[in-house]
């Protein structure tokens, strides 16, 4: 049962343009969502998060949007830079739980 | 400040063997979680340790077991290895268990190959 889904295995974007990564979830008990970035041979690195009481959180070039009614969140990267090329994981957790539930990941490639 | 470290980096085993993976948590962190990341998939939660006791477990069989030591470092043990156990094993540490959301800091992982 895949409770967190990233339906796009890969995404290619031109440098300077906007990258939009999408994530859907099925468990309405999730109340906190995170995005992680992973380079080869490294562990996932926390990027940005959002609580279910908000619909938007912004940190520099990164913005996460949450649509609770659609059980959908997205990560916007503007402008995209070559160093953003990595695998991005969406993750969810609910209060009191011990585990992060991850999506399958989306490989983002930023082309010069 | 030292981050999360894991050893070994790579490991090759054969079916039926046993393996022990090690993790040193980040300074000041008392909680360690283990995840399995199969090829092309996201990490899946195995279990978490807090104060040397298991504090939550994912959908993994009992042949996956762990330990946490007084210095908060941790081991993951897998018995009777199967081919499907081939994966990247990630360790993550966080400052405390319970309460609100405690950011988990991941190590680089151990790549296990079972032949």
Image (cartoon, grey):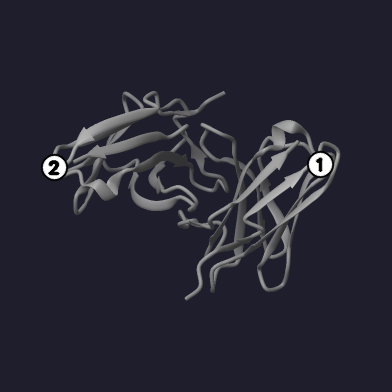
> Closest to the observer: B93 or B3?
B3
Q: Residue at x 83, y 44 (%)?
A: B79
The circle drawn on residue A43 is none
Q: Under tag 2, what secondary structure?
A: loop
Q: Residue at x 42, y 53 (%)?
A: A45
CA–CA distance between discs 2 and 1?
48 Å
Q: Residue at x 85, y 43 (%)?
A: B17
Q: Is residue B46 left or right of residue A80?
A: right
Residue A72 appears in the picture as rendered: no
Q: Residue at x 14, y 37 (%)?
A: A17
> Closest to the observer: A29 or A99?
A99
The circle drawn on residue B63 is 1
Residue B31 vertical position relative to residue A105 in the rendered view, above or below: below
Residue B79 vertical position relative to residue A26 in the rendered view, above or below: below
- In terms of image quadrants, where is residue A11? top left
Q: Is residue A81 left or right of residue A107?
A: left
Residue A60 appears in the picture as rendered: yes
Outermost residue on the bottom side: it is: B1
Q: Under tag 1, what secondary structure?
A: loop
């Amino acid at each position: 049962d895949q409770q967190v889904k990233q339906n796009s295995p890969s995404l290619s974007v031109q440098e300077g343009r906007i990258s939009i990564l999408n994530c859907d979830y099925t468990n309405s008990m999730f109340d906190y969502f995170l995005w992680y970035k992973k380079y080869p041979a490294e562990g996932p690195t926390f990027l940005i998060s959002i609580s279910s009481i908000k619909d938007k959180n912004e940190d520099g070039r990164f913005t996460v949007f949450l649509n609770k009614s659609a059980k959908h969140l997205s990560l916007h990267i503007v402008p995209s830079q070559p160093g953003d090329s990595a695998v991005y994981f969406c993750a969810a957790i609910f209060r009191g739980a011990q585990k992060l539930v991850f999506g399958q990941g989306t490989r983002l490639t930023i082309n010069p | 400040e030292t981050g999360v470290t894991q050893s070994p980096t790579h490991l090759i085993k054969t079916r039926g063997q046993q393996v022990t993976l090690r993790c040193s948590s980040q300074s000041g962190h008392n909680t360690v979680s283990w995840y399995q990341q199969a090829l092309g998939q996201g990490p899946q939660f195995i279990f978490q340790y807090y104060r040397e006791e298991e504090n939550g477990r994912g959908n993994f069989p009992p042949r996956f077991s762990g330990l946490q030591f007084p210095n908060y470092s941790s081991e993951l043990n897998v018995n009777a290895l199967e081919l499907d156990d081939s994966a990247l094993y990630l360790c993550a540490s966080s400052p405390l268990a319970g309460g609100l959301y405690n950011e988990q800091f991941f190590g680089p992982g151990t790549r296990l190959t079972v032949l």
